[in-house]
Image (cartoon, rainbow, N blue to C red):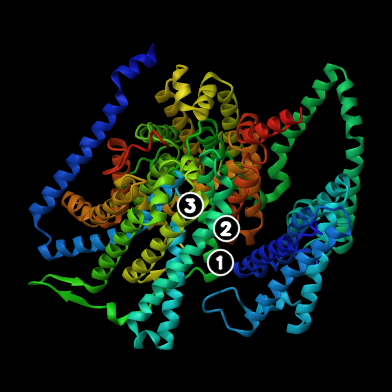
Amino acid sequence: MSTFDWKKILQIGLIGGIVGVLIALVGMVEEFNERDIIAGTLTMGWTMLILTVLVMAYFVAGTVKAHSWLNVAAGALSGAVFSVVMSLLTWMVDSFDLRQTLVNASPSLVKILTFEQGIPNGLITLIVAGIVVGAVGSAIFILPERIRKAVTLGLGMVAFLGLMQDIIQVSLAGFEGLSDAIAWMFGRGIENGLSVAGAITVFLVVSVSNLLWDTNAPKVNARIEKLPQKSRRSLKWFGYGMLFLVIIYLPAILGLYLTEVVNSTGLFILMGLGLNIVVGFAGLLDLGYVAFYAIGAYTVGVLTNLSGELTSSFGWNFWFALPAAVALAVIAGVMLGIPVLNMRGDYLAIVTLGFGEIIRILALSDFLKPHIGGSQGIVNIPPPKFLEVLVNNPQTLYYFIVAGAVLALFTSQRLRDSRLGRSWKALREDEDVAQAMGINLVATKLMAFATGAAFSGLSGSILAVKLGTIYPHSFALLISINVLALIIVGGMGSIPGVFVGGLLLAGVPELLREFAEYRLLIYGALLVVMMQVRPEGFWPEATHKRELHEADEEARLTAEGQEA
Amino acid sequence: MQSYRIRRINWTDLFMWLVGAALLALIIGGSYLTLQQGKYTAVQWFDLAVFGLAQGSVYALIALGYTLVYGILRMINFAHSEIFMGGAFIGYFAATSMQRSGFMEANPYLGIVIIFLVAMTTSVIIAVLLERIAYRPLRGAPRLVPLITAIGASYFLQYVFRGFFGTQNRAYPEIAVIKGTFPLFGDFQIQKIQVIVIIAAALMMAFLAVFVQYTKTGKAMRAVSEDKSVAALMGIDVDKIIVSTFVLGAALAGAAGVLYSFMFRIVTFYMGFIPGLKAFTAAVLGGIGNPPGAMLGGLFLGIFESLGPTLFLDGLGIPAPYQLKDVIAFTMLVMVLIFRPTGILGERLSKTKA
């Protein structure tokens, strides 16, 4: 039987097991075990492991060239291999004291992995659970596509609602009539997450409605298509109007903490829009983007602070300091741009990275301490006043950040479709050809750096008033990497992609505090996986996607040609 | 019309020449003032230079890994600094356990060899896995794709180590045989560890040079770096040669990790970043893709960085100049790339092949 490839199944199971060990030893299982997805039944730590097995079993099922119980058996087998590896780990952690080296190999990890049942019994349970979950994962594979989609969506929604339960509860707390429904959905008491009944309901509702939508979507779309031009347009405007209202009332609905989360996400999106111009449009990989952020923040800090600790005190009004900050960032952008004009790709990345480090070290040094505060930073930056309203709490800052983001959105949208935007794209595709077509490389590149720097400077100055104090440590290289990861995950050169990436990579980790520790671990893994599986990002720009899949397209064409 | 005028005046070149001239004036003026003030004795200068040489040898060892991989794949293996860190980290565990069991006391030289072997093996394993999992599927992808992968892999590895082994700084155990100093003439003396670092690095670089020049694998490596497809036609297994390049670079990085932790006696999960960046600078300085260039660049950068802050900046009355040593290193990187993108020994790569 060549269809049932033992070696491959065992191999994938082993790889899955290693991933599981990694997740456990890095400390994720233990750390995430505090948060329940389904109250008292399923914790987030377990969800990570189950997800690994599900994905692994799904792949295993794909290697079996059949469509029957054989796939399920293969999935179960790989699940068994996975749980045997995990049991070995558990046994080792239990028998030897490894905490001197592996800080997370603790008794509490053993407790979690054995379901608090002790070594022999717990391990048997673990292996049985592995087999069952593996079988389920491969069973998903042999389901018909429509049902598979509905089931995955339902499970995903349960996980999402379970994770976000405290936020949902907080934001719905204001509505009196809903309190009974909420209590039923989420349960009350010490546990968090959905109640069992709530989880089942969510799963059923989402799956069934998805199935119904899938069968009826063509009809609904056809109905909208048939509507006269005018009412279609008014439908569109109605949508925009709703969006506008939601944006205006968001801080009132969300409350203080969540508005703060939205604000920091918004700041990242603002920076992302700027870097998207440099990296996405013009194809210049800039790893020193944080430098302009720092320059914007420090300019505002130096010009407006009232601390009196620095040698030179300006005491400017924020609204005069803001344009100065943006202008300085732009000048710095051009200054960095000139030396790197002739460099491409890798060299550009390293030199810009070095530039970012230079700015941070200078900010930290004793040399400039009298002027910009050294390692103590700048304190006491007064909040600006806008039409007699003091912009000092998250609620008011929100509107400030939204205004900045809208400005950046509008600018980059218009620039993208302008002559300059098309020059950037030409530059990205092929520098030599672009030059041959009469594009002025110097001016085009410098414009990209300058525009990107302007947005970064703007976000920096917002940061300065948001925090009221700035330290050199706020401007580490990590910020550049975060922003870069955000636009790559969203899709390079795609403006909606920046928003998707921002919500995923800046918003979600802010909400799930446990993630903070593993943020960069997950980013790193995400970047590696993303580049292999979907290099164009989640919401790709059309040209970029085509370019990355050129090889596939060619392969398809040759295959078709051979068939013909 | 306007662009034509811009090109004729070439104001960007002018700007760069001005910046270069200003920096040169700063260096010369600063050195003159420092030496004139005579705050530092000859012994102090000598110590700084030897320290720079030792540090530079470590940079050179790491830089060789960058250069070898770049020569063959034309990609910057951004995660190379984590290969270095991994070797240092696991080498540290070997050292502490041997220290605790008393093995180190009894057979110090064998112990040191074991530390090296453990560290180099770890680095090699990380590098091979990295190549197999992350880089190999991306052959022939657009240039930014492997670079972004490498950045991702670098952070992933860093934080896996952080998760496994915790966030604290771990102090390296004291190894008795490499402590103390060798007296030279007069007040001059050299720390033993610095001598060991310099000699060990020199031996390994000599080994590498012989390997690349005379062995069959070395010849195949050179062939692959010239032209992959022609090399494949000549019966060379390109994938295998790429793996052996990673192995070679990683072994050197692992050894560098041990030497580095011998010297600075501290191990952390983020220890790879700065030396990695410096080593890359060194590789560029010497001409990337060119092994002798990487060695030369590493030594030069080490000495420049060690002497530079004191020599150039102290005389100008800048407080705590050593804080700015990284600024000097990175400025030098930018200046080299502008005025001599080929590096000291290299071919012109940053523009043509990049």
Which chain does the residue under circle 3 lie in?
B
The type of residue carrying mark 2 is Leu
Q: Residue furthest front?
A: B234
Q: Residue furthest top?
A: B1
Q: Are marks 1 and 2 in contact (CB under 8 Å)?
A: yes
Res B163 visible? yes
Q: Nearer the viewer, mark 1 or mark 3?
A: 3
Which chain does the residue under circle 1 lie in?
B
The type of residue carrying mark 1 is Gly
Q: Quadrant of the N terminus of chain A?
A: bottom right
- For residue B163, the mark is 1
Q: Are marks 1 and 2 on the same chain?
A: no
Of A284 and B242, nearer the camera is B242
Location of residue A189 by image quarter: bottom right
- Residue labelled with disc 3: B242
What kind of element bears circle 1?
helix
Is residue A124 shown left or right of residue A479? Answer: right
- For residue A203, the mark is none
